[in-house]
Amino acid sequence: MRSGLLWCCLVLSLTSACRKAPPLRVPIPEVTPRVRVSFQPPVDRVLTESQRASRMVEKGGTGVREEVELTTESRFTPSAGGWLLTQGVTHARQTRAGVEVESWVDDVLKRFMLRVQLAADGAFVKLVSPESAGEAVRQSVPPGVDAGPLERFFQPEVLEARTRREWEAKFGGLFQRYVSEGQRTWVVDVLPVGDTQVAYVLERTVQGTRDTEYGDAVVLSLRCLDALPEEAPDALTDAWVVAGRPELTPGVTCQGEQVVAYGRFVPVSRELTVKAQVDGAMWTLTMESRAQGLQEEAR
């Protein structure tokens, strides 16, 4: 959920996909206290989130900043022994160098409902009816306008790979288990940058817990590894191997924080800034999401 930014990264990467296994878990260290992060999503509630993604490209002393702001509404319903996450966009806004940009992408996002089948423990299973994104494209783009980039971007297999990657980068290996301060998990993540992509290992470290308006939450710090350390833990090496031994991008760095309510699952907030030097240009990608409200669904 976008979770995540299930939508913002999709929009920004239109001008710029990859599937991997979920991260391997690290044995729980003998540290107390421990908390159990359950996947018990809010049923009969509408979760409203604000989402923002920005991209700054600097080269030769000049830079251009693009930004996407979205408001999403998410619902969880029991389905197939697990959960169905349905997420829609209610507001979309894009700017370039501070000037608002009109785009057919906004109309597509507002027409298309993202449906994700999750297992009982919160693991990503599949997208449900991903082909409906193509129908949204056909309904939004007027005749005579080249819809090729949008159609390729929203191809079912491409959309599913991106959605899976984002969900697992945020939540893989977190639910239905005890965590304690200092515990780490790793997952290989990829972001589109221009005509290529940067790959890195995202390391999540449990910092502790925090009181929020959505209940007690676990706090994770986020950072990137651009190479495996010489004495890497087995779990870190295994995560890289399972992901297909991708070539990691030298020099990529990132920092951020993620806050997830446990007991009743609510993605309270997430901030991640990734920096990478690609083809002589410095790319700075910032992704933010924040829960804005959890309201009882109108009947």
Image: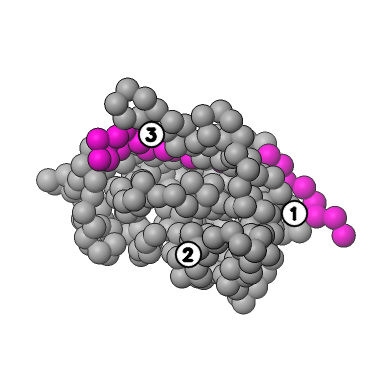
All told, the count of numbered labels is: 3
Give the residue displayed 56% in from the left and 51% down from the top.
7
SS for dot 1:
strand
Front: mark 3 or 1: 3
Q: Percent x, y for residue 203?
A: 33, 45
Q: Residue furthest front?
A: 144
- Crowd class of label 2 (few under 14; some 14 to 19; many from 20; radius 10 Å): some
Query: How far from the left and from the top, in percent, is residue 270?
Result: 51, 40
User: Where does label 1 land, which residue?
Assistant: 45
Residue 200, compared with residue 149, is above or below; it is above
What's the amino acid at mark 2? Arg
Is label 2 in contact with label 1 (beta carbons under 8 Å)?
no
Three-letter amino acid code at the position of disc 1: Arg
Residue at 72% of width from left, 46% of height from top? 294
**C-beta proximity under 8 Å, tags 3 and 1:** no
Which residue sits at x=54%, y=60%? 146
- Residue under label 2: 152
Q: Residue at x 68, y 64 (%)?
A: 139
Please give the range of residues in magenta: 271-299
Q: Is residue 60 visible?
A: yes
- Residue 216's place in the image compared with 126, above or below, is above
